[in-house]
């Protein structure tokens, strides 16, 4: 085969065969196809798209580019959960322990944050000693013993995705639904779980800005999963404001702990309750019974205990989970207050996420060092009424220069109006 002919074929809007797609992916991985041709291939896909079958073939070729994990030694229903990325999204730290307490086996490989979105691995690293780089055998044993493990993404998992994403990032081809879907699903499928739960974020603080695009992505990923005989469903959730109140690594872990104690913010609890119910109902449990089962494992402490067990198994300090006051705190706080009164109409999630990164809580560049104690805690959210000088949010910081760098942006975060705005957290569920 000739890569130029394949590139031209897709450039002209024609359908590629599974053999042609595999040839391109294999060549990109083994470097027999140079970056400039790989970039042209991606650009052709970006402009001409792919059919559902092409995207399935692309996903399969990417999945097979690395090690496909065998989870057959894990007893029970194995679940993986993925979020497309948002601000304040600590759902995995709540949902995983709940499902483990309900008897499911939660197997999750997570990534680090980059840009305005936080990563689950960075959040877990705010726990002293927590090891996200355990061996695969230890991962299997942990899931069998306690029902839950969250580790960093293995280097041998879908190497094609890493190479393609690096090229997409520098060639303006990130926002392509077939490329996004194959990137996510190749990694989920390579891990080998029975059920894949997708949380597709929509809005200002998400990568998918509008509902139609998010629905198209969710539908495609569900169809890809079905083609591989996997049970997949997706929840579309609103990211026009941060999820919960906390933004920043240790601050978000503390909020997850509070939620498992039954004291978390209502939107985070609502989302985790709904997701847990969906998993239970997929196993044949009635909706009302599913809700009662979730509430029970929170009330009796068994869900929180699963988080404690996971932290202990992976070498972390469990005392901070039992007493969140033991997390390292920032040296200073800065309070930002309302300059007028009215109903909160909009919160700029994207800018809040970037502000947390600029404080040191995230990475602007891939090799930036994280400050786990910094971040932002909201006091008011969309549809809340505020008076003049009411506290809107608190900034936790350690470096005055970094604080000064964002002060000029604070007036742009909240939009306040005269009428109360209706808001909806869960926008749709795709099966």
Image (cartoon, rainbow, N blue to C red):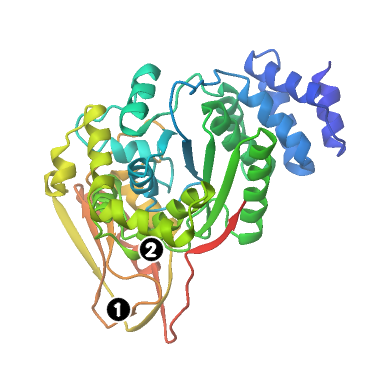
Residue 328 seen anywhere in this rendered image of the structure:
no
Separation (CA) of disc 2 from disc 1? 26 Å
Taking 289 as reference, is 56 left or right? right
Across and down, in percent, residue 314 comes to 26, 27
Residue 286 seen anywhere in this rendered image of the structure:
yes
Taking 230 as reference, is 289 left or right? left
Tag count in the figure? 2
Quadrant position of residue 11: top right
Please name the residue that numbered disc 1 is placed on. Answer: 339
Which is more toward the observer, 298 or 151?
A: 298
Quadrant position of residue 58: top right
Quadrant position of residue 151: top left
Label 2 packing within 10 angstroms: few (<14), some (14-19), many (20+): some
Q: Which mark is residue 267?
A: 2
Label 1 packing within 10 angstroms: few (<14), some (14-19), many (20+): some
Which residue is rendered at x = 76% and y = 41% of the image? 52
Q: Which mark is residue 398?
A: none
> Mark 2 or mark 1, which has the lower sequence index?
2
Across and down, in percent, residue 290 comes to 42, 56
* Marks 2, 1: nearer the viewer: 2
Q: Where 412 sits versus 291, above or below?
A: below
Which residue is rendered at x = 40% and y = 57% of the image? 273
Q: Where 201 sits versus 414, above or below?
A: above
Which is more toward the observer, 34 or 197?
A: 197
Which is more toward the observer, 294 or 265?
A: 294
Secondary structure beneath label 1: loop
Secondary structure beneath label 2: helix
Quadrant of the rendering where the N terminus is positioned = top right
Across and down, in percent, residue 131 comes to 28, 27
For the residues labelled 2 and 1, say whether their Cβ atoms are less than 8 Å apart. no
Which is more toward the observer, 76 or 182?
A: 76
């Amino acid at each position: 085969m000739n890569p130029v002919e394949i590139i031209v074929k897709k450039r002209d809007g024609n359908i590629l065969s599974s053999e042609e797609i595999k040839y391109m992916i294999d060549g990109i991985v083994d470097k027999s196809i140079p970056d400039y041709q790989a970039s042209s291939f991606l650009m052709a896909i970006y402009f001409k798209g792919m059919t559902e079958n092409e995207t399935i073939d692309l996903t399969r070729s990417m999945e097979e580019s690395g090690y496909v994990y065998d989870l057959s030694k894990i007893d029970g229903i194995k679940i993986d959960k993925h979020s497309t990325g948002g601000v304040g999204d600590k759902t995995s730290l709540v949902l995983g322990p709940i499902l483990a307490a309900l008897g499911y086996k939660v197997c999750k490989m997570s990534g680090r944050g980059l840009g305005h979105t936080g990563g689950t691995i960075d959040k877990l690293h705010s726990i002293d000693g927590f090891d996200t780089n355990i061996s695969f055998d230890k991962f299997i044993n942990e899931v069998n013993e306690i029902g839950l493990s969250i580790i960093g993404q293995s280097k041998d998992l879908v190497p094609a995705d890493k190479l393609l994403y690096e090229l997409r990032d520098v060639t303006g081809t990130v926002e392509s639904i077939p490329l996004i879907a194959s990137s996510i699903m190749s990694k989920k499928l390579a891990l080998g779980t029975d059920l894949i739960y997708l949380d597709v974020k929509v809005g200002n603080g998400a990568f998918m800005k509008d509902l139609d695009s998010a629905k198209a992505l969710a539908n495609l990923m569900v169809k890809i999963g079905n083609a591989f005989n996997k049970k997949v469903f997706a929840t579309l959730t609103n990211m026009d404001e941060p999820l919960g109140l906390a933004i920043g690594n240790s601050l978000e872990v503390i909020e997850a702990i509070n939620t498992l104690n039954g004291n978390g913010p209502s939107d985070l609890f609502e989302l985790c309750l709904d997701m847990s119910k969906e998993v239970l109902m997929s196993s044949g449990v009635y909706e009302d019974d599913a809700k009662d089962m979730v509430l029970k494992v929170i009330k009796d402490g068994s869900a929180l205990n699963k988080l404690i067990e996971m932290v202990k198994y992976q070498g972390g300090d469990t005392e901070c989970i039992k007493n969140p006051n033991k997390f390292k705190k920032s040296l200073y706080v800065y309070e930002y207050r309302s300059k007028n009164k009215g109903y909160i109409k909009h919160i700029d999630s994207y800018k809040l996420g970037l502000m947390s990164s600029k404080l040191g809580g995230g990475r602007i560049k891939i090799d930036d060092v994280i400050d786990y104690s910094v971040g932002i805690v909201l006091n008011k959210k969309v549809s809340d009424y505020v008076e003049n000088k009411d506290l809107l949010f608190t900034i936790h910081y350690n470096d005055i220069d970094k604080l000064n760098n964002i002060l000029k942006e604070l007036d742009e975060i909240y939009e306040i109006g005269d009428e109360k705005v209706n808001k909806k957290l869960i926008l749709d569920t795709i099966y």
